[in-house]
Amino acid sequence: MDLNWAVSESSDSLRPVAGNDSKYFVHHGSCEGSSEHEVQKAVEACIDKACDLLEQNIQDDSRYLLFEWNPKTSTLAIVVTDDGKERDSRDVVQCHFVANDIALNPDDIQFWIRDYLTTCTQFLHYSLIAAFHCDSRADCTLL
């Protein structure tokens, strides 16, 4: 599924947790899924986009590929971060899901991510730990 990615440059003041650089790049996508299958494919496309950026985002202290689901805005953000989940990578993948007739359950999103990562060769080339949360970075679930 092609999400027509756009890139914008932002400052730390807009980040949920500040990184060590004053600027970062958000790769925005949007999905207007009309079925659960379409939403799942869009989640997989987000993972692929984030994995395409791994080589340039991994630093010496990188530990997690963090998946952040915001149920209020139906937005998935993916970022590489350190052990304390405080220093994020320069590139962030963010996708807004507009699913008019579908209730997006965080458990489904988490399941689709975990399921896809088990066969995602780009992700498996790195020693990152996949984690998911929909409330706070302190309450992550390992995938």
Image: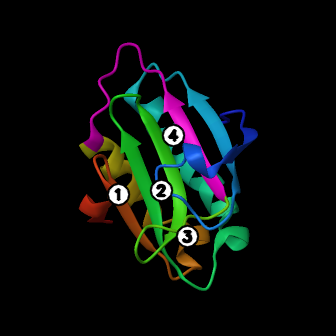
| Label 1 vs label 2, nearer the camera | 2
- Residue 24 position, x and y percent, is 69, 54
Q: Residues within 10 Å of mark 3 (few under 14, many from 20)?
A: many
Residue under numbered circle 2: 17
Q: Do the residues labelled 2 and 3 touch (CB within 8 Å)?
A: no
> What amino acid is at disc 1?
Phe
Q: At x 53% / y 58%, what residue is drawn?
A: 18
Q: Quadrant of residue 62?
A: bottom right
Query: CA–CA distance between discs 4 and 2?
Result: 28 Å
- The numbered mark, 1 or 3, whose residue comes first in the sequence reads 3
Work out whether 92 lies above or below 76. Answer: below
Q: Residue 123 carries which label?
A: 3
N-terminal label among 4 and 1: 4
Check if mark 4's residue and mark 2's residue have beta carbons within 8 Å.
no
Marker disc for residue 41? 4
Calculate the distance from the C-alpha at mark 2 to the C-alpha at mark 3: 23 Å
Please report whichever mark, 4 or 2, sits nearer to the chain's N-terminal start: 2
The image quadrant where one finds the N terminus is top right
Secondary structure beneath label 4: helix
Q: x, y (%) of residue 136?
A: 30, 52
Residue drawn at x 38%, y 29% as measured from the top left = 36
Quarter occupied by the C terminus: bottom left
Instruction: Where is residue 56? Give x, y as percent.
Output: 73, 70
Mark 4 or 2, closer to the camera: 2
Q: Going by the picture, which residue comes out furthest to the bottom?
A: 60
Label 1: which secondary element = strand
Three-letter code for the amino acid on which mark 2 is drawn: Val
Give the mark nearer the N terminus: 1 vs 2: 2
Residue position marked by numbered label 1 in the rendering: 132
Q: Distance between the residues labelled 1 and 3?
A: 15 Å
Q: How far apart are marks 4 and 3 (CA)?
A: 17 Å
